[in-house]
Amino acid sequence: MSRSLQFFTPSRAPYFTLHKLPSTSYTRFPVINFPSKKHYITITKSLSSDLDAASSQVLDSGNGQTGVSGVLSADNVVAVQSHAPSESGAAAGIEVDAVTEAELKENGFRSTRRTKLICTIGPATCGFEQLEALAVGGMNVARINMCHGTREWHQMVIERVRRLNEEKGFAVAIMMDTEGSEIHMGDLGGAASVKAEDGEIWTFSVRAFGTPRPERTINVNYDGFAEDVKVGDELLVDGGMVRFEVIEKIGPDVKCRCTDPGLLLPRANLTFWRDGSLVRERNAMLPTISSKDWLDIDFGVAEGVDFIAISFVKSAEVINHLKSYIAARSRGSDIAVIAKIESIDSLKNLEEIIQASDGAMVARGDLGAQIPLEQVPSAQQNIVQLCRQLNKPVIVASQLLESMIEYPTPTRAEVADVSESVRQRADALMLSGESAMGQYPDKALAVLRSVSVRIEKWWREEKRHEAMVLPDVGTSFADSISEEICNSAAKMANNLEVDALFVYTKTGHMASLLSRCRPDCPIFAFTTTTSVRRRLNLQWGLIPFRLGFSDDMESNLNKTFSLLKARGMIKSGDLVIAVSDMLQSIQVMNVP
Ligand SMILES: Nc1ncnc2c1ncn2[C@@H]1O[C@H](COP(=O)(O)OP(=O)(O)O)[C@@H](O)[C@H]1O
Ligand SMILES: C=C(OP(=O)(O)O)C(=O)O
Ligand SMILES: [K+]
Ligand SMILES: [Mg+2]
C-alpha cells in the first residue's frame, strides 16, 4: 500500500503531495523533483526516527533539480520545507564523480590525472554498458559527431549518458560537434567501405545515384563541385588516404583516375589541390554553420548539451553570432562554444577566434588536409600555447591512437604523439574512430590515461616549470585581482609543495585561472551548479565538486574539510591553499 510524502513550501501553499514508497521495506528514493527552482530543502519533521539519517542526505541544487534523497521506510510521513539558498547555511552534501572519488582514495591526490579525456561515441560505444565502461575508464566528456548517425541515435546517446550520471554517480559532460559545410562524399549506400584501386576511373558527382550504387561512383554533397574543379586537379580523400586525378568533366560528373589506392569510408572528407595548394573557390564561401547545423544546434540547446564544437570556423564573427544565439535560447544554462581549428582561415584569424570562443580544438584530421602535414605539429604547439595564454581550454584531436582502431596496442610513434600533447599541457585529448568504431575503445582510453599520468608525473619529478610568462587576461580591475591571486596561489602551491589547491567559484572563472597556471598539485574546484561543474570537466587539473556554499569562507572551509574527510578524500594534516571569488584572499592551512 502506498503512503504519501507531504511537502510543504512557504512560497507555494499549501502542500505538494507525492505518492511514493511502494513497499514496506526500506527504500532509497533517488531524487524527488521539487517544483520550485533555487530552493533548498530540509526535512523539518518526521514521524520516524529513521528520518534523521535521511535528513543528513538532503540534496541541494541550483538548477531546478532540487530534490531530496534519503533512506526512508514505507511508514514514514515527512514534512519537507523549502527555503532560499541564503537561508541554508548548512545545505548539506557534496557531489563528485564516482571515478575521481575512487581514484583519490586509491592513489592520493598527488597522482590524480590532470589531462582530461574525450571519447567520440559511435556504434562501438553507444550501448549503456559500453558507455559505462568508458566512464569507469576515465572519460570526462562524451562527443557526438553530427556528421554521423540520426537524430534519434544522438538523443539516445545523450539520454544514456545522463542516466549513467544519475544512476551511477558519474559527471560525464556532453559535446556536440557540428557537421559544418565541408565537402564530403555520400554514405556509400550502406557499405562500410569500398576499395579504390590504382588506375581505376571513378565518377564523383552531385547526382544522387540509385541503389544499388553503380560501380565506382561517389556522390558528393557540394553542388558547386563540378564547377570548382579543373581537369588536372588532385582530389584528396580524408587528407590523402586515397588520391585521384581529375581527368574529365561531363556536366555534373567529374571523372577521376585513382593515383593512390586505398579504402573509401562513408562520408569521407574531400579536398582538391592545384599546383600544390588547396583550391578554395566558391566552396570557401559556404557558411561555417549550415542550415542543417542550425537545426542540430537547436537540438543541442534543447537537450542542454555542455559543449558545442563548431567545425571549420573561419572567423570570430560566427562564434560571436552563435554565442548570442545560444544565450537567447538556453535560459542561463551556459553552453560552451568550442572553435575547431581545422582550416587555413582559422589559422589566419587564430587569436580573434580563440578570444571569442570558450575553448578550441586542434582538429588535426582536417587541418592536415588543408595544410602540409609537416606543418601540423608546429600549428598544434602554437594553438595549445595561445589557448593557455588566453585562458581557454584546448583539445588535441584526431589520430592519437589511430592504429588501435584495429589493433589492441598502439604504435610507439602514437605513444610519443600522445606524450607530446600531454607534455604541451593541453587540457584534453580526444579519441575519434578509436572509440567510435574501433575494436578496442576501452584499451585506447586506458592508453591515454596511463600515458597522461606517466608524463605528468615525469614532468613534476623533473620540476619542469616552464618559463612561459602568462600575459594578463583580465579586462576589469576585479578580474585582474582574481588573476593575480591565482598566479600567486599557484606559485605558492608549487614552492610550498602543498597537497591541493581549493577554489570556491560560482562561474568557474577562478578555477580556470588556476588551471591555466598548471600547478604541481591538483585543484579541487567547488561550484554551486551542476552545469558549471560539468564544464570544468574539460579543464586541466581541475577536480570539480558541486557544493552549496556561502560568502563566509571560514564556514565553507570547515564544511568542505568535514565532508571530504568523512568520505576519505582528504585527511588531517594535508596542506591546502584556498582561494575564492567571493573573498579575494589566499589562505594556507593544514586540514584540521
Ligand atoms: N554516430 C556515428 N555513427 C556511425 N559511425 C560513426 C559515428 N560517429 C563516428 N563514427 C565513425 O567513426 C569515425 C571517426 O569519427 P570522427 O573522427 O568523429 O568522424 P570523421 O571521420 O567523419 O571526421 C567516422 O569516420 C565514422 O566511421
Ligand atoms: C576532429 C576533427 O573533426 P571531424 O572529426 O568532425 O572531422 C578533425 O578534423 O580532426
Ligand atoms: K564534425
Ligand atoms: Mg574535422
Image (cartoon, rainbow, N blue to C red):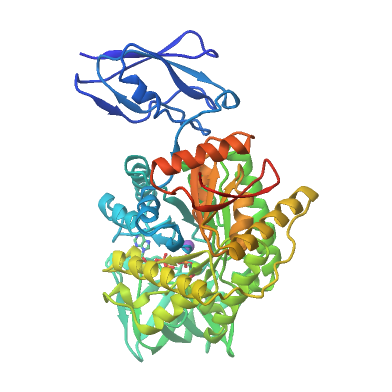
The quadrant where residue 347 appears? bottom right
What residue sits 27% from the left and 68% below the top? Answer: 440
Above-or-below relation of 459 to 354: below
Residue in view at x 44 percent, y 75 percent: 418
Residue ranking furthest to the right:
477
Q: Nearer the viewer, residue 206 or 549?
A: 549
Can see residue 530? no
- Residue 277 in percent (x, y) is at 59, 85
203, above or below 427, in the image: below
Residue 109: quadrant of the picture: bottom left
Number of numbered labels in the structure image: 0
Q: Does residue 180 sit above or below 563 in this rendering? A: below
**Nearer the observer, 220 or 208:** 220
Q: Position of residue 130 (x, y in %)?
A: 27, 55
Q: Is residue 89 visible?
A: yes
Which quadrant does the N terminus fall into? Answer: top left
> Viewed as shown, does residue 313 lie left or right of 433?
right
Q: Position of residue 235 (x, y in %)?
A: 48, 82
Q: Position of residue 246 (x, y in %)?
A: 48, 86
Q: Nearer the viewer, residue 564 or 152?
A: 564
Q: Is residue 518 left or right of residue 485?
A: left
Q: In the displayed structure, does residue 405 sit left or right of residue 256?
A: left
